[in-house]
Amino acid sequence: MTPLDRYHAEQERAKAEYEANRRAAYEEEQRRALEAKKRAYLEKQERQRAAKARRAAARRRVFISRLILFAVLFAIIFTVAAIAVGISFSSTKKTETDVESYEYLYVYDAEDDDANLSVSVSDAVSVKDGVRTVDFSIIADMASMTVVGSSASLKFYTGEEECVILTEGSRTAVVNSNSCELDTEVWVDDDGDFWVPVSFVEDYVTGVSVTVVTAGDTDGEAENSVTVALTGDTVSFTLKESDTIEPITEDTYPGASDTTEPAETTMIELPTIEFTADLSDYEQYMDIGTSDEYLILVNTTHTLDEDYVPTDLVDVVYTRDDGRNTQQMRLYAEKALEAMFIELFANGYDGVGSSGYPVSVTSGYRSYSYQISLFNSYVEREMANDSSLTLSEAEALVATYSARAGTSEHQTGLCADLHNLSSAQQTFANEEAYEWLVENCWKFGFILRFPEDKEDITGIEFEPWHYRYVGRYHAYIIMSEGLCLEEYVEMLSEEE
């Protein structure tokens, strides 16, 4: 073999060796990519299994809570029935002399004279801040109302499923989801009865009359007495939900091209809720009953146009203090969010996260124009990071984690981004504060809007930082049943 032949042979061997090494490197790269995809898939499966396990555990807790609640309610009803029987026997022994020994006499009339009850209290507890008050608990008993709630806040339901919410120490009552200012605050006596101004009964309750007899104007009746009587077959409230709350339609939300009006649902019993902090002042904002005012659905098929701006925006107290503008939300959503932060911190989650921030709000209401600029900035960033992307490809990529203008529910003023990281990241799901929020947010009327196992329905990647206000009743069903808002609204529409 000539030197030239040997040279060519060496070149062929070197070329073959290079090709073999290149092919091996390519195969190794493909193998690693495949393993990475496999690991990512297995990790996602594991997260989904963990999420299902958490939901199953939550359902078990709800079942046990309901069972305990049923047992407690049964015991309470049995005890109340026994006390009522005892009172009915003891009341027949009262004499006119006994009654006259009290300064104020409350007479509760019934159709059957033999069923009349006479209950007396002193002047010191019948007047609050100079305003005469009446025992609403006994009015509820006369009208056979259903009463649910805690010792600090009660809901009184009539036979027509109308509802009034009274909260101890509050100067506001909620009548069929309408807030009413009172002449004095609601107070609770030693027996757990709720007292309200006489003017509240006169102005907002129908089917009940309240007659106050003062000194010098007795006309044959007991001096300084208040007589409460049923005047009709039913007791109801003058305020109705339609007085201030419009159905969720295109007309209700100006510029909404398509919205859904969920049907009314049968009221279910919620588990008993106990808070570490005193949140009585916030109860009316967290619990709005079955009202659908805050169920507006906004996504790629249910849109808002640029003219929609909520009229009741207020500043968010827990906006992150890093130089950003104070965020805003609608009034009820912001107040309920305040309560959630107070309870979060009261349970020890007031420290800073891995990025040095405490849990705080980084984004609330966003205008249509701001959402345009935000979306476009993300598109520019993606194209800068990958020059091979076309504009449409970059927009499609951004749409998986950021909404186009008109499709973002931030424009409703009913949601907030909150976390303890330097920026919104899925790693917030690893923080203990996130676990607390997911388990407890429904108590304050919030839901995790974009769960990780609903991406094919919402069209948005898992966002552990994004919480949406809908009201406690709806939030409980959504979170306990493992639904997303799209599924819940569809479920309600099917019940029509």
Image: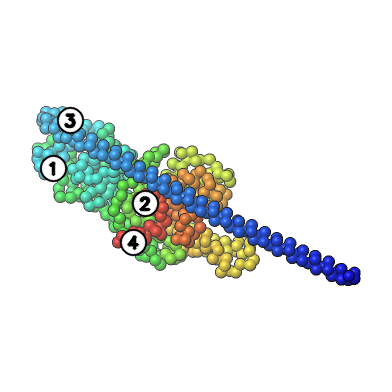
Badge 1 local density, few (<14 within 10 Å), some, or many (20+)?
some
Q: Residue at x 31, y 49 (%)?
A: 268
Nearest the camera: 5 or 440?
5
The residue identified by callout 1 is: 110
**Distance between mark 4 and mark 1 Cα atoms:** 43 Å
CA gap between label 4 and label 3 equals 56 Å
Crowding at mark 3 (Cα within 10 Å: few <14, some 14-19, many 20+):
some
Element marked by disc 2: helix
Callout 4: SS: helix
Quadrant assignment, res 342: top left
Task: State the residue position of label 2.
Answer: 477
Label 1 vs label 3, nearer the camera: 1
Which part of the image, by quadrant, shows the C terminus?
A: bottom left
Position of 171 with respect to 113 (left or right) is: right
Question: Do the CB atoms of the residues marked 4 and 1 lie less than 8 Å apart?
Answer: no
Question: Which quadrant of the figure contains the N terminus?
Answer: bottom right
**Residue type pointed to by label 2:** Ile
Which of the marked residues, 4 or 3, is nearer the chain's N terminus?
A: 3
Image disc number at residue 102: 3
Between circles 2 and 3, the one closer to the viewer is 2
Occupied quadrant, residue 68: top left
Q: CA distance from mark 1 to mark 2?
A: 40 Å
Residue 323, position as x, y percentages in the image? 56, 50
Q: CA distance from mark 2 to mark 4?
A: 15 Å
Residue at mark 4: 493
Amino acid carrying mark 4 in the image: Ser
Q: Amino acid at mark 1?
A: Ala
